[in-house]
Each structure stands twice: as C-alpha cells, then as structure tokens.
Amino acid sequence: MIQKLIITGLLVFALGCTARQYDVVVVGGGTGGTAAAIEAARDGARVLVVEESPWLGGMLTSAGVSAFDGNYRLRGGIFGEFADSLAARYGGYEVLKSGWVSNILFNPAVGADILANMAREAGVEVRFRNSVQSVRRLPAASGIDGTWRINLDDGSRVKARILIDGTELGDVALAAGAEELKDSRALQDMTYVATVKYYDHDVTIQEPEDYDPAHYADCCATWSAEMMLSYGKLPDGHIMLNWPQSGNDIYLEYLDMPRGEVYRQAKNRTLGYVYYLQTVLGYRNLGIADDVYPSPDGLPFYPYYRESRRFAGRDTMTVEAAKSPYDYDLYTRAVAVGDYPVDHHHNQHPLREELSHLWWGKIPSFSVPLGALVPVNVEDLLLCDKNISTSWEINGGTRLQPVVLGIGQAAGALAAIAVKTRRHPSEVPAAEVQAVLLDHGCYLLPFLDLKPDQPGFRELQEKGVRGEVKGRGRSIGWANETWVNIPENE
C-alpha cells in the first residue's frame, strides 16, 4: 500500500512538472503581442499568450491610451479590422472622431472586448493575470527543434518553439539574453492615464500624496480647460486624461526602478492632476470613472510607457531611413507602416530644452523592416512592441499604436512560417512574410495610391518592395504621406 502511494505520488509530481508544448508563446498581451498571437493562430500555429493584466491590448486598453495616433488613411490588416469593429460598435467612423487628439477614440473596455473576441475566434489561448519567472532555451541536436522552457508565476511550465516578447519594457528579451541597444538616450516621459467621467454630484478626491499644484499650473497655458478636456473625449462621453502640457506626464528612470515605486509615483502625478482639475479649475463633478477598469482604484492596470528597452536586430530602423528610404535597402523588407511625426515627450525631463528638437521631428510616412523584429544573437526569439531594433530617435514614430499592431502582426506571421517550415525566423526571407501579410490586407509600404480592397493594391505593394516603383514622401503637419503618383490636385 505504501509502495503504491509512493508510485502514485511520483506520478502526480511528474505530471505536475510536465510542460505543455506550444508552437508560439507570446509573453505580454499588449498591442503588439495581441496582434502577433492573433496572426500566428490564424496561420495555423498553436499559440499561448501570457498577460499580467485581465485584458488584451496593452497601451490601447490596459494602459488606457484609447485613441489611435496616425495611420487613419493606412487602415489595413489587424489594425484595419480593429478599427472597423470599433466603427461598427459605435455607429460609424464619424462617431469615433469625438476628441481632437485622434480620428479614432473608444472606451478601453470596448477595445478590450473586441480584441478578446478576435483572439478567441483565432483560437488563441490566454493566461491572464500571469507573468514569467524565467525563460531558458533548450538546445537540440538538429538546431531547429530547440525549445524554450518558460516558468510562469502560477507555478506552471510551458514550452515554445518560438518565443515572442510582447512585454511593455522588453523584460523577456532581456532575460533571454538579447543584445540591448545602448545608443545615447533619455527615457521619454511616461503617463499613468486616467479615464474620467462627469457625475451628478461632487466627487472630489482627497489630496494625493506628493501633491504639488505647481506641476499643473500651466496645463491651460495654450488651450482652454474645455479644449484640454475635449482633447481625449471618448464617443460615450468619458474622457481620456493623457495631457502632456503640465498634466499627468512624469519623468522617471523607470527601467531601473522597482515597479511598485514607478506605479506609486506615476499614479500620484495623475491623481494630483485630477485633484487640480477638481479643486483649482472647479470640475468637482469630474472624477475617475467607476465603470471602465475592473481595478480597485478605477485606474488602468499599468502605465503608458512610451519607451522600452530596445534590442539589436538584423535590421535597425532610423530617422535617416525614414527620411530617405531609397538610400537604404530596408524598404525591401518592409512589413509595417506609420505616418506619425517623430513624437518625443520630454516636457518633464531635466534636459528638456536640449531635447526639444525631438518633439515634432518631421519625416514622411515610413515602413518598418522585418529584421528589426529579429534579434541578432538569439535564435527563435522575436520582438513585437516598442522593444524592436530602432534608433532612439525614430522610436518616437515607431512606438505609436497602429505601427505596433502592424509590427505584431508581422511577428506572428514570421513565427507561424518558421514553425510550419521548420526554420529559424532568421532563415525566413522577408518576401514570404510579406506575401502572408498581403493575403491579410496589410500595407507593406505607406503608398496612399490604392487601398487594400482596391484592384492593383497587392501588385503595387509587391512592385514597391522590389524597387520597381518608388514612392515620394512628404511631411505636411501631422499628415505625413507617401505617393507613387501624387494626385494633381495635391
């Protein structure tokens, strides 16, 4: 009997230690990670997402930045699907233009619901409220079947053929040994966004810790209070508080700080902003929404980081390549597009005047090359968020949500191809990934001549990455653009 119990106990222990095998494990269900998981699953891979919050979507949802920056005329792929779903939910694209910061605004909970549905329909498995303790790549004789072993905080263990880092700060790539880029940099200001709404009674909060009204004294120096609040007005009347001018931006060296302390300081800066709006500007019935985030304090699950650790890739995107794409060959490996200026937030930085040239650096619309997603020194690891291989400067353009969705979709396509064809991602030609992305209505190059649903779109994009046709880019305020044939009335 004792022997039987010992054998049974050993069997249970062995089963408990068994690691479940996946083709692709995405750590971080953020903006890029969610897109990567959906694309890889649609392409036939068995996919797991490990996400610390209860939502998918990252900066778009869990961090509360529910307003798209740019790419309004470049709606393709998963970004286009998501935008179309938002328009369908709210009753049309015009309804989404509720605040002047963006053409597409939405309630974060609505965005999270749409992305959850997309992931579920694709067959993605998600483990919410979980994170990674450690990752290790197990060698194999063939070199192709080397498998990642991933230990999770819930005590379970999984294995993956391809590991994708979709974390907010590049934590997994760092743990996996990827080479971190060390170019000169100063971290951008971060923001603990708040979603607020009007109540029919006074909802003034207690004065928060570290409150200093001087932080917010110039929040209406350029715009009226009404304009400031309408900046992030959502279609349902809620308001996104993500105000860079003496608002809730804060400068912290957050990569080297304990996460709890980062959250504490960033939250207090935002709560101070809310308190200032209530007590100094008189908006006593404007308070943190109680019907958006299932969190104890009504705030998003984590802050909005504009910058992550970045890692050396087989391609590195730069401002120079964006300005003069045909002086480089990166455009031939294009997999994602963006049309936003180089937008750096350094208002709170001690060296803000020295960095002011970066606030609205003008570039034409641009493409991100596939190699920026593939680390130079670690096989079977992919990058898919703000952690990709870019210069510090161009991160101000590549970090925006539509671009990151495109980067994530490309990472998912590459991962699925590598699994299916038993190759390392570094061995997969860009043309194979580009073909899959075109199948799914993605832009490779930001040509405005044709949309994905128009005849000739695919042919134009294919000729573009082969260099058979070339676009002409220009910067017009926020409307950065590229045309093969600029319309005569332009």
Image (spheres, rainbow, N blue to C red):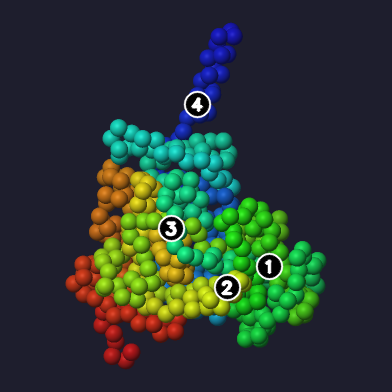
Q: Which residue is mark 1?
A: 270
Task: Decide: few, some or many residues near mark 1? Use Cα within 10 Å; few <14, some 14-19, many ≥20.
Answer: many
Distance from disc 3 to disc 2, alpha carbons, whole Å, reads: 22 Å
Task: Decide: few, some or many residues near mark 2? Use Cα within 10 Å; few <14, some 14-19, many ≥20.
Answer: few
Q: Secondary structure at mark 2?
A: loop
Choose the circle earlier in sequence order: 3 or 2.
Answer: 3
Q: Which residue is mark 3?
A: 181
Residue 427 appears anywhere in the view = yes
Quadrant that contains the N terminus:
top right
Residue 217 screen position, x and y as percent:
71, 80
Which of labels 3 and 2 is toward the front?
Answer: 2
Kindly identify the residue that appears in the image at 29 percent across and 87 percent down.
Answer: 487
* Type of amino acid at the residue the image marks with label 2: Leu
* Left-right relation of 162 to 434: right
- Disc 4 + disc 1, Cβ < 8 Å: no
* Left-right relation of 456 to 416: left
Distance from disc 4 to disc 1, alpha carbons, whole Å, reads: 47 Å
Which of labels 1 and 3 is toward the front?
Answer: 3
Choose the circle earlier in sequence order: 2 or 1.
Answer: 1
| Tally of numbered tags | 4
Residue 37 screen position, x and y as percent:
43, 52
Q: Secondary structure at mark 1?
A: helix
Choose the circle earlier in sequence order: 3 or 4.
Answer: 4
Which of labels 2 and 4 is toward the front?
Answer: 2
Which of labels 2 and 1 is toward the front?
Answer: 2
- Disc 3 + disc 4, Cβ < 8 Å: no
Kindly identify the residue that appears in the image at 28 percent across and 45 percent down.
Answer: 423
